[in-house]
Amino acid sequence: MARVTLGDRLEVLASSPHLPEGRRQFAASLLAHYQKRRSLTKGRRVWVDRLEAMVEEAKNRDPSEHEALVADIENVMTRVEPDGWSADFLASIRDQAKHAGARLSRRQQEIFDKIKSENTPEMVERRGRWAHEYQTHHRETAAVLATYYLTTGYWLDMARAIIDDAEYVPPMDKFQKMSQNKFAAKVLDAWRADPKYPVGTSVIRRDNAKAWGLGKGGMVLSTTEPIVSASAGCKRYKVLPYDAAEPIMVEERDVKLFRRPKVK
């Protein structure tokens, strides 16, 4: 009987239906290395035994175990966005379980559980109402945040779409992440806060502030200008300097009430 070589064993592993696609590709790479050098390094050699053990484990596993897992994954797949990352991930682990009968790794299971919890029937129903909810309740908030994010380098594609297309509706989960963080909270708090200096108020630059062009003070024309930073006092004003013909933009933190000297 001919001796079974490492090459023979790797050929079997590279085509085994009991290994996930990624493991079969790895076995194929080991086979290519072996065919080129007629040997494997110690670190590569140990993987031949490990892969064969994986095959034996899959062969001896109760089929109902991975069949139930496949059914669970496919059930969740019907509720995720078909062209998103989650759909690709679910398809990958479904094929892994379906074709190899393999259990999920701990990390794969964690990700699957997270996707599953975020795509319950109730969440799917809410996503179905999301477009109306967004246009009715979140459109203004989205525009405020989009203007801010365009200055930061984050969420750029979604921010541009929000500003450029009034009919655009961002994905619910992405909008929640964009709008429910500490930076967004500071921007929205400033946007919604009553202005410290209402329209018509005279203001002047604070010492060491950035509001250049207000050396002689100016009048507040608007208190609802787009916010571009997430700092205390970031509410923005349009101010017309007393010695200029064009208004400038200033942040609330950079100005103070201008009190004209009393005439004696």
Image: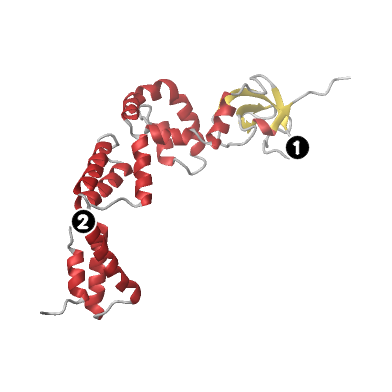
Q: Residue at x 35, y 29 (%)?
A: 123
Tell me the crowding category of disc 2: few under 14, some 14 to 19, or many 20 or more residues within 10 angstroms, Cα based.
few
Disc 1 and disc 2: Cα gap in Å? 78 Å
Q: Nearer the viewer, residue 49 or 224?
A: 49
Query: Measured from the top left, where is residue 202 in percent x and y?
Result: 71, 23
Q: How many marks?
A: 2
Q: Residue at x 49, y 38 (%)?
A: 149
Horizontally, residue 77 falls left or right of residue 192, namely left
The image position of residue 139, as x and y in percent, is: 43, 25
- Judged from the image, the secondary structure of the residue bearing numbered disc 2 is helix
Q: Which residue is mark 2?
A: 60
- Give me the disc on residue 113: none
The residue under the point 40% across, 25% down is: 134
Q: Amino acid at mark 1?
A: Asp
Disc 1, disc 2: CB below 8 Å?
no
Relative image position of residue 2 (x, y in whole percent): 12, 79
Residue 129, quarter of picture: top left
- Residue assigned mark 1: 207
Q: Is residue 54 above or below residue 86?
A: below
Which residue is depicted at the point 35% across and 73% down?
A: 43
Q: Is residue 174 left or right of residue 121?
A: right
- Colour logic: secondary structure
Residue at disc 1, secondary structure: loop
Front residue of 75/199: it is: 75
Front residue of 204/254: it is 254
Image position of 48 with respect to 58: above or below: below
**Foreground pick, 170 / 207:** 170
Q: Is residue 106 above or below residue 259?
A: below
* Residue lying farthest to the right in this orientation: 264
Q: Earlier in the sequence, mark 1 or mark 2?
A: 2
